[in-house]
Image: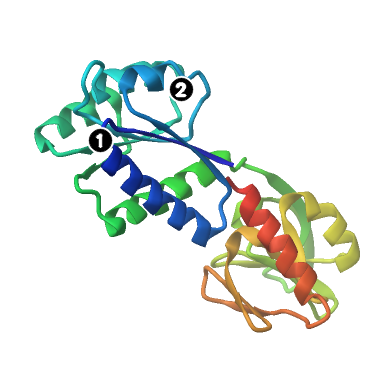
Amino acid sequence: MLKIAICDNDRKDSLKIETIVKDYLYIKSIPYRINIFWSGEELLGYHAKFDLIFLDIAMDGINGIQAGKKIRQKNRNVKIVYTTNYQQYCIQAMNNVHAFAYLEKPVSKEKAERQLDEIIRYIQEEKEKTEIVKFEIIEITKEGKLEYKIKNFEVKDIFYFEYFNRKIKIKLENEEYFFIDRMKDLAERIREYNFEACHQCFLVNLRHIKKIKGYEVYLNNNERLPVSQKRSADFRKKLNKFLQSCI
């Protein structure tokens, strides 16, 4: 769940940001919780950690820059997006608080959604671990002989596995490797890394799926994989569950 705070003493501005964020997260099917605060003091008095804070700079009492400094001391990973009518404060906010971005008021839907795209991507990348899997791949020597060697792969670099000509192909962005195994055994081994069968011959890395259209999976390397009619409903449920768990 994405935990968000909006802190602005102008209720009209707060409501606009809240509406933009809610609409965006609803379309993306990302679970969230939003807390609204009307002052820096109120925000600092709330002790839960947030993933993202929309923070007005010019507030009475503790201003946004002062509040941001205190928040940053407790939570180094929070993404702070400043909102302001005064551009002259933006450099100070960036340098002193290391803000993620700033949005000029009145906040536009287009610019806010662009920042949300970046923030979601950063949060997802931070949550991903560098997971390694090993396979005994087959290589052909200069003499034309088959050679078997153990090779490490980062899970995030693998787009899919394909059963091909009695071997299994590992598909990376610009490379392919082959090893011998049964798809059933491989599926059990790598299920914990969010690979699922869209077809009896394919195990696809869910993090590399751009969309599903009809009975095809579109990957973010512009390849398409088939989705069998028999597996379609279950595969879509697993993909939706994975996408919601990313935040």
Disc 1/disc 2 C-alpha distance (Å): 25 Å
Work out whether residue 176 or residue 195 is closer to the camera in this orientation and state it.
Answer: 195
Query: Can you name the residue that lies furthest to the front here?
Result: 11
Residue sitting at 35 percent across and 16 percent down?
70
Work out whether residue 152 or residue 126 is closer to the camera in this orientation and state it.
Answer: 126
Q: To which quarter of the image does residue 1 belong?
A: top right
- Locate residue 230, reporting x and y percent: 83, 80
Q: To which quarter of the image does residue 201 belong?
A: bottom right
Residue sitting at 54 percent across and 44 percent down?
32
Which residue is under mark 2?
A: 75
Give, as a three-letter code, the residue at label 1: Asp
Q: Residues within 10 Å of mark 2 (few under 14, many from 20)?
A: few
- Locate residue 40, reporting x and y percent: 32, 21
Q: Which mark is residue 10?
A: 1
**Nearest-to-viewer mark from 1 and 2:** 1
Query: Could you tell me if residue 139 is visible in this image?
Result: no
Whether label 1 touches label 2, CB < 8 Å: no
